[in-house]
């Protein structure tokens, strides 16, 4: 099996603004870092990891604990890039092409706290020049690029766009359907799934912030309270 390079795009400034009804700005930053920690734990067994930063944090040493924790055996690099998501990732893909494409590339979003190493093993076992793990609402949560011809186009219905882009290039596209990989965190209601199914740093942080599961609403979906 070819080696895999993992890229995690990450933005700390104004992190997770749609959670502002339930979390302060500082709490949202803490949540973003907790989710990044869980994602690193999930992907670190695949290969070297690059955290692609949109805006470097103002606090020095923000990532020191994340990348030097016991049990993390991958090389973890921090790469600052002021570009928006698509041009930043496509520039990184181009750089890998110029290097001779030494490793396949897995792009993993930083807000997937339920994802586990076993999920990624299944994804890596899925055939295709490109393998996509869709998110809810038509987004792309993970994309494994095995053919260097492929480029990304996030935002909007990126899952369908990526399928069409692969077809236009004559590439085979695999789809990896996964509850855990499909559960990204954007809205307050998404925190329910983290509290129910999460096992890492993210639910631990939410509990420390005073969140708990309470009650039952229609179709037996739990609610969170604080």
Image: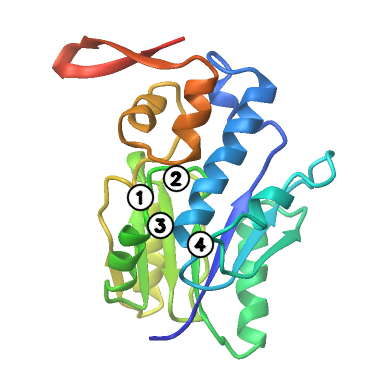
Closer to the camera: disc 2 or disc 3? 2
Closer to the camera: disc 1 or disc 3? 1
Proximity of marks 2 and 4: CB atoms separated by less than 8 Å: no
> Dot 4 surroundings within 10 Å: few (below 14), some, or many (20 or more)?
many
Secondary structure category for the residue under label 4: strand
- In the displayed image of the protein, which residue is found farthest to the left? 219
**Which residue is rendered at x = 50% and y = 80% of the image?**
149
Kindly identify which residue carries mark 3.
Answer: 161
Proximity of marks 2 and 1: CB atoms separated by less than 8 Å: yes
Distance in Å between CA atoms under marks 4 and 1: 12 Å
Closer to the camera: disc 2 or disc 4? 2
Secondary structure category for the residue under label 1: loop
Q: Disc 2 or 4, which lies upstream in sequence?
A: 4
Relative side of 215 to 211, left or right: left
Relative side of 26 to 35, left or right: right
- In the displayed image of the protein, which residue is found farthest to the front? 70
Relative side of 185 to 12, left or right: left
Kindly identify which residue carries mark 4.
Answer: 107
Q: Disc 2 or 1, which lies upstream in sequence?
A: 2
Closer to the camera: disc 3 or disc 4? 4
> Dot 3 surroundings within 10 Å: few (below 14), some, or many (20 or more)?
some
Which one is nearer the viewer's eye here, 69 or 142? 69
Q: Disc 3 or 4, which lies upstream in sequence?
A: 4
**Which residue is rendered at x = 51% and y = 62% of the image?**
107
Residue 110, position as x, y percentages in the image: 53, 48
Secondary structure category for the residue under label 2: loop
Q: Disc 1 or 3, which lies upstream in sequence?
A: 3
**Which residue is rendered at x = 46% and y = 68% of the image?**
45
> Dot 1 surroundings within 10 Å: few (below 14), some, or many (20 or more)?
many
Kindly identify which residue carries mark 2.
Answer: 112
Depicted 37 relative to depicted 170: above or below: above
């Amino acid at each position: 099996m070819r080696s895999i390079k993992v890229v995690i795009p990450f933005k700390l400034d104004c992190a997770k603004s749609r959670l502002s009804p339930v979390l302060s700005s500082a709490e949202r930053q803490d949540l973003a870092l907790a989710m990044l920690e869980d994602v690193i734990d999930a992907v670190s067994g695949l290969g070297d990891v690059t955290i692609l930063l949109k805006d470097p944090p103002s606090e020095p040493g923000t990532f020191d604990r994340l990348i030097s924790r016991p049990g993390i055996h991958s090389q973890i690099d921090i790469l600052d890039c002021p570009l928006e998501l698509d041009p930043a990732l496509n520039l990184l893909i181009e750089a890998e092409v110029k290097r001779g494409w030494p490793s396949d590339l897995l792009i993993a979003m930083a807000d997937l706290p339920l994802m586990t190493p076993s999920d990624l093993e299944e994804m890596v076992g899925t055939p295709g020049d490109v393998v996509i793990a869709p998110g809810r609402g038509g987004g792309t949560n993970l994309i494994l690029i095995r053919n260097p011809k492929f480029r990304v186009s996030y935002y909007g219905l990126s899952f369908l766009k990526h399928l069409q882009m692969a077809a236009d290039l004559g590439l085979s596209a695999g789809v990896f359907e996964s509850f855990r990989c499909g559960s990204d965190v954007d809205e307050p209601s998404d925190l329910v799934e983290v509290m129910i199914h999460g096992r890492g740093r993210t639910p631990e942080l939410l509990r420390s912030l005073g969140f708990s599961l309470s009650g039952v609403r229609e179709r037996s979906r739990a609610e969170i309270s604080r």
